[in-house]
């Protein structure tokens, strides 16, 4: 059985990995490079129980466990480590000392206070997302999967049966027994070829600093001079860098992931926000100014499962902020579904693409 996976982000790489573990033929098609979009520019924060109380909980808990076992079993380093996670309040307008419930790490400034511990090394962890995605793809290739450079232009349907029979890549047919759409926010393009719900792209900006503080991950509630409130996140990494995100963008999703770029002034503003939390961090060298789009569906839940009415076609996208966390369990469940007819490790019912109406192909404007 040959499966074409459209998209070389963390979801596509994870599906390829778990298909290869079952000795099935997986071919990943990617036009701009593995982990080139959100999978290479996210924070890489993982949480065991932050989805508890929602239908995402079983997926998140299974995936958190898989992250640990993958890090322990694979001979590659992608910066996996368990971390303490702190809630922080910072303000340019008022004294935040009254919010201080725990001692602050030494690298925080006087305008920031730790108000609580929101994760422990038993419940929160982190990875370098680009390194993890590339490691999963490399492991899949080592086990027989293939990576093809090219742009997916459409899906081939068998005459008569209407079953998915391959993908059109740069105008040529790449035949297969099944096709998976795992294009992140660019999965919207597949609405032109298949009856799929919409997946919007929500833009965010981030900075990577050359700075090695203590390893706590910080979730910050920040008040600027003008009273505006934002929620930046700060993730120190074991490679001596620190990742900061939390500034949304407004640009529409471009047709080509290679055209994604920070908006004017965004990096400077994010650095100002960082300075309120840690002047020391904000003064460090900036190694990367970047932006990406995370895929979001109408109800906020991912699309994981068969495409309604088209045998052999599947979709895995729309993971919003939890794509890096939930990629392993998504890949595992999709491999079970494609090769065995049903997922056994996680109930994919809540993520059935059929729960949402298909988007009109004529309205796709990317």
Image (cartoon, grey):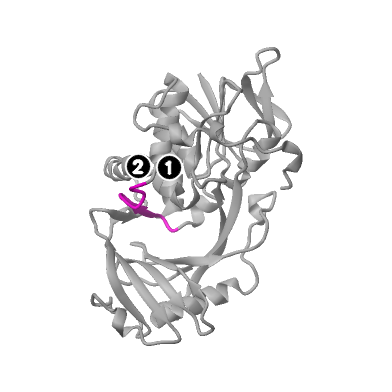
From the viewer's perspective, is 58 left or right of 20? left
In front here: 273 or 355?
Answer: 355
Q: Percent x, y for residue 177?
A: 56, 19
Magenta-colored stretch includes residue 244: no
Residue at 71 percent across and 14 percent down: it is 159
Residue 142 visible in the displayed image: no
Contact flag, marks 2 and 1 (Cβ < 8 Å): yes
Most frequent secondary structure within the magenta stretch: loop
Residue at 30 percent across and 49 percent down: it is 48
Label 2, label 1: how many angstroms apart (C-alpha)?
A: 7 Å
Q: Percent x, y for residue 235?
A: 38, 64
Label 2 crowd (10 A; few <14 / some 14-19 / many >=20): many
Residue at 69 percent across and 31 percent down: it is 193
Q: Looking at the image, is mark 2 or mark 1 earlier in the sequence?
A: 2
Q: Percent x, y for residue 271?
A: 50, 76
Can you name the residue that lies furthest to the right here?
362
Q: Is residue 294 placed above or below 221 in the rendered structure?
A: above
Residue annotated with mark 2: 63
Residue annotated with mark 1: 327
From the viewer's perspective, is 299 left or right of 60? right
Can you name the residue that lies furthest to the top here?
160
Secondary element at image label 1: helix
Secondary element at image label 2: helix
> What segment carries the magenta color?
43-53
Magenta-colored stretch includes residue 45: yes
Where on the picture, by quarter, is residue 111? bottom left
């Amino acid at each position: 059985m040959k499966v074409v996976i459209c998209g070389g982000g963390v979801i596509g790489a994870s599906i390829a990995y778990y298909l290869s573990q079952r000795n099935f033929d997986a071919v990943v098609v990617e036009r701009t490079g593995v982990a080139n979009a959100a999978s290479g520019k996210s924070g890489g924060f993982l949480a065991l129980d932050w989805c508890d109380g929602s239908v995402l909980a079983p997926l998140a808990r299974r995936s958190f466990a898989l992250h640990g076992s993958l890090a322990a079993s694979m001979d590659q380093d992608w910066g996996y480590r368990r971390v303490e996670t702190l809630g922080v309040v910072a303000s340019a307008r008022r004294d935040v000392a009254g919010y201080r419930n725990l001692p602050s790490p030494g690298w925080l400034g006087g305008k920031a206070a730790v108000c609580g511990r929101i994760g422990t090394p038993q419940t929160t962890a982190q990875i370098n997302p680009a390194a993890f995605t590339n490691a999963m793809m490399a492991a899949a290739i080592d086990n027989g999967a293939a990576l093809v450079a090219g742009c997916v232009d459409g899906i081939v349907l068998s005459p008569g049966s209407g079953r998915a029979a391959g993908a059109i890549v740069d105008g040529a047919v790449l035949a297969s027994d099944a096709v998976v759409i795992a294009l992140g926010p660019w999965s919207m393009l597949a609405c032109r070829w298949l009856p799929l719900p919409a997946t919007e792209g929500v833009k965010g900006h981030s900075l990577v600093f050359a700075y090695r503080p203590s390893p706590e991950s910080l979730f910050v509630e920040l008040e600027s001079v003008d009273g505006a409130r934002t929620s930046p996140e700060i993730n120190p990494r074991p490679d001596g860098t620190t990742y900061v995100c939390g500034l949304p963008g407004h640009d529409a999703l471009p047709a080509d992931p290679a055209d994604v770029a920070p908006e004017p002034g965004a990096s400077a503003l994010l650095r100002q926000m960082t300075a309120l939390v840690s002047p020391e961090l904000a003064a460090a060298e900036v190694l990367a100014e970047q932006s990406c789009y995370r895929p979001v569906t109408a109800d906020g839940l991912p699309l994981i499962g068969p495409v309604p009415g088209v045998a052999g076609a599947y979709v895995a996208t729309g993971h919003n902020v939890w794509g890096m966390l939930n990629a392993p369990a998504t890949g595992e469940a999709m491999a079970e579904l494609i090769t065995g007819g049903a997922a056994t490790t996680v109930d994919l019912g809540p993520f059935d693409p059929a729960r949402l109406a298909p988007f009109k192909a004529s309205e796709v404007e990317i």
